[in-house]
Amino acid sequence: MSSNYHVTHLYPDQMSIYGDYGNILTLKYFCERIGLNFIYQPIGIGQELPQITHLYFFGGGQDKEQMLIYPDLLTKQARIADDLLVKNIGMLAICGGYQALGSEFITGQNQAIPGLKILPVTTSAPNTNITSRAIGNLVVESEFFGTTLIGFENHSGQTYFVDSDIKCQPIGKVLVGYGNNMEQQLEGCIYGNIIGTYMHGPILPKNPEITKWLITRTASLDPQQLHKLQNLNTSLESKTRRELINHFTENLK
Ligand code: GLN
């Protein structure tokens, strides 16, 4: 059984905003706490995907950066789709990365950025006007994770589920903010070991349940490591999140 955990970070130079890199640091920290050897594999434009990956990380970016990376991303489509949909390798994809897992992203300037067509979602932006962007803190009640999650969103894209044989589910119901789009009060998409979300912030240090879920689902843990992971004390994170949720929901009372 391997005690290595390989994380492949797609396009860190272009796709890593609003603290997204903090997710890598959090994964490394959790792995080290349970004696799992964390191996970080940043992959840029023109570079080949590594042989071994347990979890892909795909952060957010500006439309301009999404435009830059997509031709290279499409060359990796078959391999990534096979890894995620056949081999059950995990992925955490945030905002621009989440949009790239869907069929396409039509920008506010009406440019089509093709996606990987892995998740049954599609995204388009109404225009480039700052007032029509979804910006701010996000509070999400998640039955899936059994808790209320927080993050920070900043996107023009409005993401909708489309009909598909791939039966995915949202991460949860939006209590504060927008999430996938401005109409449905739904946030994110989960399928297998893939999480697509609009929660920057970064998401993992703020929501340790998601970090634990990702590592549990995608690493080869021995029983001792699993026990350690399940029992890692994250009460400080939970307390901080509770305070923030109280603050963010104050206006709703
Ligand atoms: N450029 C995309 C949008 O505005 C994604 C932004 C992001 O990743 N924060 O919708």
Image (cartoon, rainbow, N blue to C red):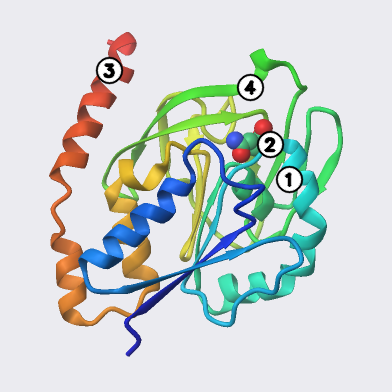
Which picture quadrant has residue 240? Answer: top left
Q: Amino acid at mark 4?
A: Arg
Residue hosting label 2: 62
List x then y, in percent, for residue 175: 38, 26
Residue hosting label 3: 247
List x then y, in percent, for residue 44: 68, 61
In the rendered structure, are the residues bearing label 3 and label 2 in contact, judged by CB atoms less than 8 Å apart?
no
In the rendered structure, are the residues bearing label 4 and label 1 in contact, judged by CB atoms less than 8 Å apart?
no
Q: CA distance from mark 4 to mark 3?
A: 22 Å
Of 149 and 252, the residue lying toward us = 149
Q: CA distance from mark 3 to mark 2?
A: 29 Å
Residue hosting label 1: 66
Q: Is mark 4 within 8 Å of ligand 1?
A: yes
Q: Of tags 3 and 2, which is closer to the observer? A: 2
Q: Of tags 1 and 3, which is closer to the observer? A: 1
Q: Residue at x 66, y 17 (%)?
A: 132
The tag on residue 74 is none
Please indicate whether residue 240 sits to the left or right of residue 47 in the image: left
Q: Is mark 1 within 8 Å of ligand 1?
A: yes
Q: Is residue 131 visible?
A: yes
Residue hosting label 4: 133
Q: Of tags 4 and 2, which is closer to the observer? A: 2
Which of the image's four quarters has the N terminus?
bottom left
Q: Residue at x 79, y 28 (%)?
A: 108
**Label 3 Cα crowd, 10 Å radius (few <14 / some 14-19 / many 20+):** few
Please indicate whether residue 131 sits to the left or right of residue 229 in the image: right
Q: Amino acid at mark 1?
A: Gln
Q: Amino acid at mark 3?
A: His
Q: Is mark 2 within 8 Å of ligand 1?
A: yes
List x then y, in percent, for residue 207: 31, 44
**Label 1 Cα crowd, 10 Å radius (few <14 / some 14-19 / many 20+):** many
In the rendered structure, are the residues bearing label 1 and label 3 in contact, judged by CB atoms less than 8 Å apart?
no
